[in-house]
């Protein structure tokens, strides 16, 4: 028997779209995106065919980590509008057939949160991981209040870890509390109350930030998994149509723990995000010294390997079984966009042909549908720069709606924009690509339409890889064959089945299929029916 209810059926067909609210559309001219701006562009999302958006944290915050430092989980940040504006957005989205997920920052708050302010002055408060020790243990940050000792941060120093306990005691670290101590229990109740608050206001679930980080010193994440299992049990009863998608990067662990789905990410799992990076990472955008500079599969040189991703996908699906999902993002606010040098616009249709026909749930980061690029060299805005080679701002620039001076993002003077626009005079825009039937935007839309009208191409039908070199060749279900050549030279593969020679092309460019085999020109792709 499954430990959980099956995921709500809508999730299996979902095409996700990520909105970074400060960068999407500014309706009131202050240079920062807002809820009214998102509401004004729901037509674009409905036209594109996405049906589930997730919005990065939009709650009250000092914004030192762009909203991932929450000071009040139950009130929205004024720069985005009011709680009523959010409710209005959710309702309008619903009328467009679009569900809204919010971002639950489960592992930490801002130091400005009233819970933390109280804890910093009260040695009997256990909402945070606090060591009343002198000298401070390594990794702890000195108390800003009257309380002695210090607290454990979860990410930046100004993001104190909420106390969900430790999986095991350590006599040398007397501050460790068990997972069922009073502070951890209060925090679990709080998570439930926060979720309930927003779910009763019409949202359809959450993307959960750093979902694996809750219980400390937790080998195999067993106690963290128990915590999510408990919350999923509650969710199944209280909000059975809602979903939880984790930022964990290890579906084999997070989905059995209770998440309806998890993202393949640039980190997480046995190889620290190896599977996703082996597809996309060009090494020129957000990059870490400890990451091996392996050529990515979606690279013009044709030097990458698909095998690592395919193996990780097979292993994860095996572990999660029927009811769970893996989401595959084009990029997100933390790592490079698909259009990241040297990968350019010409290479993107092939990448999308893969991303939108693989059985993972596709997630499109705003702007990737027109091939907005990762913009290098931007200033540190609200914690975007992690290291000199890891600047997240490049994936957070204002959405390019039209070809006007503010790109249709905002009427504010450019110096007041949340982040600078891409300065490239040839930067793509939604308006220009809408007018051009051959544009990436139209290709992405057509691929989404095909996916949503063709059960073989959805998340529920089997995939079989026939060729994992260049070109990539795989079957979906009974009747569909996908050919993708991310390289800049013609690549050939044998025909998996003689019946494929008579296949009809549903979408594509540069691919021929005949009795002699498959030939895919530079950056060619095709979805075929046989
Ligand atoms: C992951 C989020 O995606 C990232 O943007 C944030 O800085 C950290 N978690 C801390 O919350
Ligand atoms: Ca605004």
Image (cartoon, helix red, strand yellow):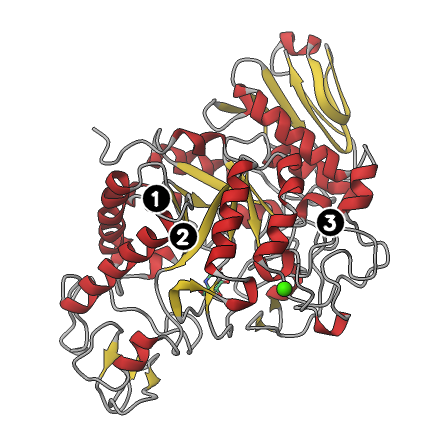
Residue labelled with disc 2: 248
In the depicted structure, whether residue 339 falls above or below residue 240: below
- Disc 1: CA contacts within 10 A as few (<14), some (14-19) or many (>=20): many
Expressed as whole percent of the image width and height from the top left, the position of residue 194 reads 32, 57
**Mark 3: secondary structure:** loop
Q: Is mark 2 within 8 Å of ligand 1?
A: no
Q: Of 107 and 523, which appears nearest the observer?
A: 107
Q: Is residue 471 visible?
A: no
In the depicted structure, whether residue 493 falls above or below residue 136: above
Mark 2 vs mark 3, foreground winner is: 2
Q: CA distance from mark 3 to mark 1?
A: 33 Å
Residue labelled with disc 3: 343
Q: Of 197 and 69, which appears nearest the observer?
A: 197
Between disc 2 and disc 3, whose residue precedes?
Answer: 2
Q: Quadrant of ligand 2?
A: bottom right
Residue labelled with disc 1: 259
Expressed as whole percent of the image width and height from the top left, the position of residue 122 reads 21, 84
Mark 1 vs mark 2, foreground winner is: 1
Residue 145 is left or right of residue 86, and the answer is left
Q: Quadrant of the C terminus?
A: top right
Quadrant in the picture for residue 7: top left
Q: CA distance from mark 1 to mark 2?
A: 10 Å
Between disc 3 and disc 1, whose residue precedes?
Answer: 1
Is the Cβ of the residue at disc 2 closer than 8 Å to that at disc 3? no
Between disc 1 and disc 2, whose residue precedes?
Answer: 2
């Amino acid at each position: 028997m499954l430990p959980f209810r099956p995921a709500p059926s809508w999730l299996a067909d979902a095409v996700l779209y990520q909105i970074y609210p400060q960068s999407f559309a500014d309706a009131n001219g202050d240079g920062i995106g807002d809820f009214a701006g998102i509401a004004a562009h729901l037509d674009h999302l409905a036209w594109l065919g996405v049906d589930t958006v997730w919005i990065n944290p939009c709650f009250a915050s000092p914004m030192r980590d762009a909203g991932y430092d929450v000071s009040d989980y139950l009130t929205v940040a004024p720069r985005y509008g009011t709680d009523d504006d959010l409710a209005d957005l959710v309702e309008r989205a619903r009328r467009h057939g679009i569900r809204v997920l919010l971002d639950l920052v489960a592992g930490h708050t801002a130091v400005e949160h009233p819970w933390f302010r109280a804890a910093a002055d009260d040695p009997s408060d256990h909402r945070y991981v606090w060591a009343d020790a002198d000298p401070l243990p390594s990794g702890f940050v000195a108390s800003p209040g009257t309380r002695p000792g210090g607290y454990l941060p979860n990410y930046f120093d100004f993001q104190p870890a909420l106390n969900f306990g430790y999986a095991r005691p350590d006599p040398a670290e007397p501050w460790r509390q068990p997972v069922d101590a009073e502070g951890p229990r209060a925090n679990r109740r709080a998570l439930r109350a926060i979720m309930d608050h927003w779910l009763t206001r019409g949202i359809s679930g959450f993307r959960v930030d750093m979902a694996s980080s809750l219980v400390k010193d937790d080998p195999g994440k067993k106690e963290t998994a128990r915590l999510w299992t408990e919350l999923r049990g509650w969710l199944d009863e209280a909000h059975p149509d809602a979903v939880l998608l984790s930022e964990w990067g290890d579906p084999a662990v997070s989905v059995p723990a209770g998440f309806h789905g998890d993202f393949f990410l640039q980190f997480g799992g046995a190889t620290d995000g190896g599977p996703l990076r082996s597809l996309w990472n060009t090494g020129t955008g957000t990059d870490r010294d400890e990451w091996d500079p392996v050529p990515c599969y979606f690279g013009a040189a044709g030097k990458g390997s698909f095998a690592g991703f395919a193996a990780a996908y097979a292993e994860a699906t095996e572990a999660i079984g029927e009811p769970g999902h893996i989401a595959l993002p084009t990029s997100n606010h933390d790592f490079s966009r698909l259009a990241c040098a040297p990968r350019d616009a010409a290479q993107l249709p092939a990448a999308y042909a893969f991303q939108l026909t693989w059985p993972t749930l596709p997630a499109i980061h705003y702007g990737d549908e027109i091939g907005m690029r990762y913009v290098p060299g931007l200033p540190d805005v609200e914690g975007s720069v992690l290291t000199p080679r890891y600047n997240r701002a490049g994936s957070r620039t204002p959405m390019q709606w039209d070809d006007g001076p503010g790109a249709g993002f905002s009427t504010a003077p450019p110096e007041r924009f949340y982040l600078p626009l891409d300065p490239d005079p040839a930067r793509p825009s939604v308006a220009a690509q809408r007018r051009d039937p051959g544009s990436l935007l139209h290709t992405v839309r057509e691929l989404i339409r095909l996916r949503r009208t063709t059960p073989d191409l959805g998340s529920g039908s089997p995939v079989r890889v026939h060729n994992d070199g260049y070109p990539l060749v795989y079957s979906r279900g009974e009747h569909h064959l996908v050919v993708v050549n991310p390289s800049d030279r013609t690549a050939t593969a044998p025909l998996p089945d003689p019946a494929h020679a008579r296949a009809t092309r549903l979408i594509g460019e540069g691919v021929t299929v005949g009795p002699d085999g498959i030939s895919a020109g530079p950056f060619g792709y095709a979805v075929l029916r046989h």
